Amino acid sequence: MYSPISAMAERIEFDSEELIENLRKSRGPFIWALVLIVGAALVLTSVYTVEPDGKAVVKRFGKVHEVAGPGLHFKLPLGIDTATFVPTERILKQEFGFQTDIPGQRTLYRRDSPDMKQQSLMLSGDLNVIDVQWVVQYRINDPDKWLHRVRDQQGTISDIAEAVMRRVVGNRLGSDVLTIARVSVANEVLQSMQKILNEYDMGVNLVAIELQDVTPPDAVKPAFNKVNEARQERERLINEAERERNRLIPTARGQAKQTVAEAKGYSTNRINEAKGTSARFTSILKEYKQAPDVTRRRLYLEALDEVLPSVGKIYVMPDGAAGALPLLNLADGQARQKGAKK
C-alpha cells in the first residue's frame, strides 16, 4: 500500500547518502584550504615589526615577557603573545589652552573650544585673571611602566600639568607672570611635575615646559594695554631723567673741581705774595737798622715817585706868596702837538 510518509522518508534517506558521498569526494581540497588558512594565521600572528622610534612590550597570557627593540621579531601566534608599540624615541607633547591645527612652515593655532579657553584662565597671586597657554614636552623612558603604572597616561599628565601650573601661577604676581617671570615659572613647573611623575613611577621624563603665550583675558586687554602704555611712559621719563642726570652731574663735578683748583691757585698766589712782601719788609727793616736816615729818605723818594704821577697838576706855593705861582703847562702843549700830527 502506497504511503506519502514512507515515500518522503525514502527520499530523505537517499538525499543524505548522496550528500555524504559528495562531501567525501571534496574533503581533500577543503582540508588543504583549511591548512593554508591556519598556516597563514600562524605566520601572520607570530611575526611583528618594531619601528625605529620606539620599543614593543610583549606580553604572554597578560604578563610582560620581554621588551623588544626596533626590527623584525617573532612571538607565539594566535594571541598567546601580544606586542604593544610604545614610541620611546619620540618627544611627545600636550598643548594647553590651544591646539595646533596646521603644523609646518606657517603653523596655525586655534582656540575654538570653550574648554581650551577655560583651561588657560588662571588666578594669580594678586587676584588677577590671566590667560596662560603652554606646552608640555616629554619622553617615555620605560615602556613597561608607561603601559602598566596608570590607566590613563595622557589624562594623568594633563591633570598634573594643569594642577601644577595653576599652583605656580597662583603663588606669583600677575604682572610678573606676564612680563619677567616666564622662564622661572616654566622651570618651577618642570621640576614640580617631574617630582610628581617620579612618585607615580610612570616611566616618563619631561623635556621642556614652554609658555606659548601669556596675556590678560580679552575682556581686560584694553585696560591692560593702557597700563602698559603708562608703564612705558614712566620708563621713558625715568630714562630721560637719568640721561639728564648723567649729563649735568659730570658737568657740575667738573665745574666744582675747576673752582677748587682756582681757589687753591689763588690761595697759593696770595700766600706767595704775602711771603714776598713780608720778606721785602724784613730786608728793608734790616737795612733801615743799619742806616736809618738814608733808608728813610730813600723810602720817601720811592713813595713820591709812585704817588706823584697819579696826582695830575701840581701847584708850588712859595713861602709868603699870596697866590699860586703860574706854571707853563708843557704837558697840554705836547698833547696838542701829538693830536695835530695825527
Image: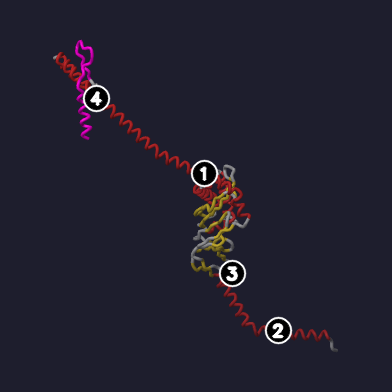
Residue 334 on image: x %, y %: 20, 28
Tag in front: 3 or 1: 1
Q: How far apart are marks 4 and 2 (CA)?
A: 153 Å
Task: Specify which label sits upstream in the sequence, 4 or 3.
Answer: 3
Task: Specify which label sits upstream in the sequence, 2 or 1.
Answer: 2
Give amino acid for label 1.
Arg
Give amino acid for label 2.
Leu
Residue wearing tag 3? 78
Give amino acid for label 4.
Glu
* Front-most of residues 196 and 260: 260
- Tell me the magenta residue range: 314-342
Residue wearing tag 4? 273
Q: In this view, does 205 lie above or below 252?
A: below
Tag in front: 2 or 3: 3
Residue 65, can we see it? no
Residue wearing tag 1? 231
Give amino acid for label 3.
Leu
